Amino acid sequence: MRFDNLVYSDEIADPTSPFFSANISVVQEGIASSLLESADIEDITDVIVQRSGGFVVEALVTLAMAATVEEAKNTLVEYLLGSIGNNITIDNQSVSFQSTSFCAAQGLNNTLAGQLTFLKSEISQTAQSVELCPGYTTTGGSPRATRMCTGNFVSPSVWQDPVLNNCFDGEESEEDTDILETLVETLENNPVTADNVTQVSRDVADVTGTVDLDGGDLDHVAELLKIITNVNSSSPEVTSNTVEIVDNVLDLEENAYEESVSVEAPSRILQALENQLTNLHQGGDDVNFTDVRGFVGAIAFTADKEYFHLR
């Protein structure tokens, strides 16, 4: 939390300054007494006032069993809105409340699997995403991703980066021997839109990296890429997934291209990659994209006139 009516200066940030010495006890005692008036807070372990660059307070508190973090935060702000002492008042917009014993629910928007949501989890627990693998995959109904909550019960707990699951990392059913063909049919009957193109492109990247592709699969891959790129998404995540799909195809054995490969399939696949790189530039923002794989790489950026002049 920060304060409304203090001018931030080197003097405030210096714990050896006269100003700091004169106000630290006032702030500590004022905050401690205010917090302990709340029924949502049982104990205060410490109040730390100085942080690099400003006069900032951190308090480690123990919540009552029945209190949620949001309830405790609201109560804390309510009690601290009054004067702490020496006419020092709290900037209530700067108050944040972080748990040291669990990770709060959180949603992530820009992942290679699209939107991912993780519910509240205790420290050392691995949470599963709310979003599940779709029914057309070999692991339909399993979580798209997992995420570990870490902490030491002293510092605020922290979510680790999510780990994406391969939705095609399962056994194919005997009835579904051509999973790529089935996927094409599914997506043709269930239109891919801006809302789900990231998830779909992730699924196609997973399946092309998991199944044993042969030359006859290239037409299906080309069609899947066409479905994805026709959405005209400017998402970097969709673009990365597209690069991965093309890389998976280029990883085929050399003789695979001699087996039942239509003349148009390879060129259609590369055209799809070019189209997606064009889509990337349609978002209106400057582009700075690099994704280099084992067999293919893509670099896209926004260059001004000076760049071409210098070239």
Image (tube, helix red, strand yellow):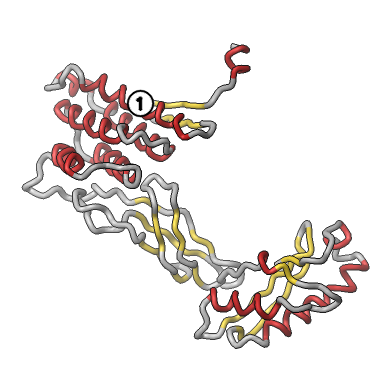
Kindly give the residue lying farthest to the left in the view shown: 175
Q: How many marks?
A: 1
Q: Is residue 132 left or right of residue 286?
A: left
Q: Is residue 145 left or right of residue 12?
A: left
Q: What residue did someone put label 1 on? A: 275
Q: Is residue 192 left or right of residue 185?
A: right
Find residue 285 and report its horizontal and vertical position in percent. 52, 34
| Residue drawn at x 78%, y 56% as measured from the top left | 53
**Picture quadrant of residue 130:** bottom left
Q: Nearer the viewer, residue 20 or 250?
A: 20
Location of residue 137 with respect to 12 vertically, above or below:
above
| Residue drawn at x 56%, y 72% as measured from the top left | 153
Q: Nearer the viewer, residue 282 or 258?
A: 282
Q: Residue type at mark 1?
A: Asn
Quadrant of image for the N terminus? bottom right
Q: Is residue 258 left or right of residue 250?
A: left
Number of other residues with Cα within 10 Å of mark 1, as a class: few under 14, some 14 to 19, many 20 or more: some
Find residue 140 and report its horizontal and vertical position in percent. 22, 55
**Picture quadrant of residue 28:** bottom right
Find residue 288 and report its horizontal and vertical position in percent. 52, 31
Find residue 152 and report its horizontal and vertical position in percent. 56, 69
Location of residue 190 with respect to 297 vertically, above or below:
below
| Residue drawn at x 36%, y 47% as measured from the top left | 113
Quadrant of image for the C terminus? top right
Q: Nearer the viewer, residue 15 or 234?
A: 234
| Residue drawn at x 32%, y 46% as measured from the top left | 196
Q: Secondary structure at mark 1?
A: helix
